[in-house]
Image: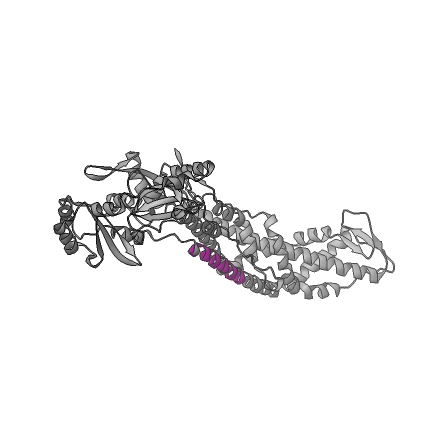
């Protein structure tokens, strides 16, 4: 597929691990209420498909090149288009890392089961501002299948998006299987299987292959040494066992042949209809997956049981003058023929009852597959990512003016250093920073702001005079042991830029003690403790295990 890039997961949250750690409830294989559901799940190798959804690591591959329309794409694959956002004198600008990939990336409409990510890199730019800038640039091409992701953000949302696509593909497979258990085709399927199993040749072969035992005496098959009997009672007892075991072998073979044909029909439908969507789907219809079909012989044997009495009622070979070799084809062959003739006489009744049982079996299978689908849909709903369109609406609230003219006008007031829009106690609020007391600028802000009732003006010069440019207490820092200080320095080096980019109110970061006397901590200096900017989260209480002390200028 071309170049690959790796994405660093900043934090493997326990919540995300829990979302991916699910187990599918297997249907109870009660012989009285048996279905093919578990066998179907085994045949499509459900455990492998689920395992492909679950694994999470701190690194995950993302594909740098979008596929062509001829490529087979694995559900849940993540494709990336990278951009860089940077500030200049005209505002925020966007540079595409490889412009040649843009057209192909946005044409991924055929790959509806993939995740398309615009990966955003920026420095000295707030994360939400960078994402909003990218959205405004590409919004005419962004659909619900395109996700905006900043390099400072964790992998959680992309993991959920990919997991949802994989689960949906698995659900589609099961729905397709269920829809192709066609009740209308069952009569033909049962008839075709019966033609093969009910033939004299097949019944004779099964009869020859029956391995008999009479009490402690081993009799064997037609390939075993001779086993001669003269007693009519012994012969009758052994014949009854031979008939029962032959019918039992027939029921197992008939059940297997019916189910093989059902699975073959499903396999053909999948290959024809969804080969592109599920290129890696394996449907193993080998006999290994039909062990559970032994349950079918319970039903079919009950239908065959009256035939045992019919066959036994056929006149027995007179044994007072002649001995009988139980393992001789000359003796077993006529028994097989008697079974065949009895089946032919009762064929209509047998076919009617077998078809009824198979239809019931398929109805239960459909019902059980529905239960499995609902369980997967529950996991998919629980894994649902955040609604990006709602997030974008929240990001747009950061722009506090209704018109571009107002933005240009306020920029002409040199006293306005900037502003932050967000919520205080759940209500919209704006904090504006003025270089000096400028009543004209303040008046314009109150008249044109979206949230005039909650505009708070801060005179930065006056504030600095009051706070005397608050600094970190150097004595508090010096009292921290050197190994802890080094760990704190490393933490700030690693996380500092990300913290400031993801929290617009944070303007400084350093080492200190809680309230300058408590435990060693990361001190975050912010413009407003109460204000949570639109699109952002609360400032964390811990960073890399160290407590955070939030200090307001």
Q: Residue at x 45, y 36 (%)?
A: 482
Residue sitting farthest toward the right:
321
Is 49 placed left or right of 84 in the picture? right
Horizontal and vertical percent for residue 174? 48, 54
Q: Main secondary structure of the magenta part?
A: helix
Q: Is residue 484 above or below residue 230?
A: above
Front one among 199 and 234? 234
Q: Position of residue 131 (x, y in %)?
A: 29, 44
Horizontally, residue 185 falls left or right of residue 122, namely: right
Toward the front, the furthest residue is: 475
Q: Position of residue 268 (x, y in %)?
A: 48, 49
Residue nearest the observer in this picture, 123 or 365: 123
The part of the chain drawn in magenta is: 362-381
Look at the image and say whether residue 377 sits in the magenta stretch: yes
Q: Is residue 282 left or right of residue 239?
A: left
Is residue 372 one of those drawn in magenta? Answer: yes
Q: Is residue 532 visible?
A: yes
């Amino acid at each position: 597929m071309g170049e690959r890039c790796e994405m660093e997961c900043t934090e493997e949250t326990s919540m995300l691990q829990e979302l991916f750690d699910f187990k599918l409830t297997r249907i109870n294989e009660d012989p009285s209420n048996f279905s093919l559901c578990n066998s179907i799940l085994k045949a499509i190798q459900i455990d492998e498909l689920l395992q492909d959804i679950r694994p999470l690591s701190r690194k995950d591959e993302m594909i740098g090149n979008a596929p062509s329309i001829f490529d087979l794409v694995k559900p849940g694959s993540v494709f990336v288009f990278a951009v860089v956002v940077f500030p200049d004198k005209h505002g925020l600008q966007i540079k595409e890392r490889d412009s040649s990939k843009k057209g192909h990336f946005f044409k991924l409409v055929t790959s509806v089961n993939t995740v398309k990510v615009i990966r955003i890199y920026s420095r000295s730019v707030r994360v939400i501002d960078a994402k909003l800038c990218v959205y405004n640039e590409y919004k005419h091409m962004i659909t619900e299948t395109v996700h905006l992701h900043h390099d400072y953000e964790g992998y959680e949302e992309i993991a959920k998006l990919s997991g949802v696509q994989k689960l949906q593909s698995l659900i589609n497979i099961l729905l397709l299987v269920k829809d192709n258990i066609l009740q209308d085709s069952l009569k033909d399927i049962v008839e075709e299987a019966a033609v093969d199993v009910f033939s004299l040749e097949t019944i004779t072969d099964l009869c020859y292959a029956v391995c008999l035992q009479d009490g402690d005496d081993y009799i064997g098959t037609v390939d075993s040494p001779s086993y001669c009997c003269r007693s009519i009672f012994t012969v009758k007892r052994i014949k009854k066992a031979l008939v029962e075991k032959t019918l039992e072998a027939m029921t197992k073979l008939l059940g297997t042949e019916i189910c093989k044909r059902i699975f073959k029909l499903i396999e053909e439908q999948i290959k024809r209809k969804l080969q592109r969507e599920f290129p890696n789907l394996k449907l193993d219809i080998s006999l290994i997956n039909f062990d559970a079909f032994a349950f079918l012989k319970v039903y079919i044997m009950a239908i065959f049981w009256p035939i045992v009495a019919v066959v036994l009622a056929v006149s027995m070979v007179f044994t007072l003058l002649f001995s009988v070799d139980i393992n001789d084809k000359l003796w077993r062959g006529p028994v097989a023929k008697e079974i065949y003739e009895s089946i032919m006489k009762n064929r209509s009744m047998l076919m009617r009852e077998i078809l009824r049982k198979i239809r019931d079996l398929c109805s239960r299978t459909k019902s059980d597959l529905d239960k499995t689908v609902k369980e997967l849909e529950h996991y998919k709903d629980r894994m649902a990512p955040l609604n990006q369109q709602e997030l974008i609406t929240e990001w747009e609230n950061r722009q506090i003016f209704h018109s571009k003219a107002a933005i240009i006008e306020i920029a002409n007031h040199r006293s306005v250093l900037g502003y932050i829009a967000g919520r205080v106690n759940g209500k919209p609020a704006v904090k504006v920073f003025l270089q000096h007391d400028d009543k004209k600028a303040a008046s314009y802000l109150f008249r044109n702001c979206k949230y005039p009732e909650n505009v708070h003006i801060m005179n930065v010069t006056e504030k600095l005079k009051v706070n005397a440019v608050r600094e970190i207490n150097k004595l508090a820092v010096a009292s921290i042991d050197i190994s802890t200080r080094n760990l704190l320095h490393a933490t700030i080096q690693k996380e500092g830029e990300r913290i400031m980019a993801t929290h617009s109110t944070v303007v400084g970061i350093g080492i200190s003690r809680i309230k300058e006397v408590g435990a060693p901590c990361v001190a975050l200096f912010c413009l407003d403790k109460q204000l949570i900017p639109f699109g952002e989260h609360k400032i964390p209480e811990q960073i890399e295990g160290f407590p955070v002390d939030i200090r307001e200028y």
